[in-house]
Image (spheres, grey):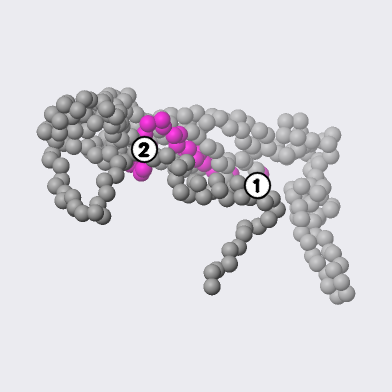
Amino acid sequence: MTKNFSAAHPFVDAFWDSLSIFSKNVTLECAGGKPGAMQKCRTCNGRGLKITMRQLGPGMVQQMQSVCPDCHGEGEIINEKDRCKECKGKKVTNETKILEVHVDKGMKDGQRITFRGEGDQLPDIEPGDVIIILQQKEHELFTRNDNDLYCTNNLSLTEALCGFQFTLKHLDGRDLVINSPPGVVVSPGSVRCVVGEGMPFYRNPFEKGNLLVRFDITFPPENFAPPEDLQKLEKLLPPRPKIEIPTGEDVEEVDLVEFDESRSQGARREAYDDDDDDDHPGHGPRVQCAHQ
């Protein structure tokens, strides 16, 4: 027999101890009652199983086997007045035991810690195990993938173009100062790696995975600088790509504006369909005939 318990595993790069308290049945050196009080069950003849025959039809009989209702599968019964006051005639008693659980560095979600022979004890039956199943808690900043850690950091456009420095509180309490030198451009959605700052390997804690940081870039608002400053800024940036603008009557110059989803053609069509359904309740979609 096996007992399963769940233990929340803190998402930390450290050794963690836990105390698990549970109750289990322990066998006693007891016959369950007074000497000679335990009698063989007459219903099942000491087998603990009851066999019932059921007539299904002419010449067809079904045999069913179930646990004996009188002795509950024990094969023996004892009168209520002769039962042991401590074990209530069951030959076992309930005991509370404390197990000390050691969670090593690098252990993962769903990993099991087994305590052999710590399950319930029953007469003439080998006790089962107690299995502790680790459950990894979610972290507000880090996400774990095997032995690698992932996190997201937001940069301004200035930091993305001119270099940056920021601090990151690691799981073990250390403050990591992460640097990116000027000239290294960080694009939106790019991922950079800090080698050896991930989770430790199980049973090899001196070797660790990597810390991967995904960067989001916050662009400045519109009209953040006057036109003359933008011209100065453009001189510092790489030159614009050269394009050839065609000429002629078929060339038309247009402007880009902010997109309004409610003004899109699809939204207008859906609104028109909704109005049409309201005007004709209970009718299905109209069918138009093709022109000959």
Residue in the image at 43% along x and 29% along y: 17
Say if residue 32 shows up in the picture. yes
Q: Which residue is mark 1?
A: 278
Q: Position of residue 194 (x, y in %)?
A: 24, 36
Asked if residue 136 lies in the magenta stretch, the reply is yes
- State the CA–CA distance, disc 1 to disc 2: 32 Å
Asked if residue 146 lies in the magenta stretch, the reply is yes
Earlier-in-chain disc, 1 versus 2: 2
In the image, taking residue 292 as reference, residue 80 lies left or right, namely right
**Type of amino acid under label 2:** Glu
**Residue lying furthest front in this view?**
249
Residue in the image at 80% along x and 67% along y: 62
Task: Please say if the residues under marks 1 and 2 sit with CB atoms less than 8 Å apart.
Answer: no
Say if residue 29 shows up in the picture. no
In the image, taking residue 100 as reference, residue 274 lies left or right, namely right
In the image, taking residue 43 as reference, residue 251 lies left or right, namely left
Answer above or below: position of 79 versus 70: above
Image quadrant where one finds the C terminus? bottom right
Q: Nearer the viewer, residue 250 or 214?
A: 250
Residue 54 falls in image quadrant: bottom right
Residue in the image at 61% along x and 50% along y: 276
Q: Which residues are magenta?
A: 123-148
Q: Nearer the viewer, residue 251 or 259?
A: 251
Q: Which residue is mark 2?
A: 258
Answer above or below: position of 129 versus 221: below
Q: Position of residue 199 (x, y in %)?
A: 32, 37
Where disc 1 sits, the SS reads helix
**Type of amino acid under label 1:** Asp
In the image, taking residue 73 as reference, residue 133 lies left or right, namely left
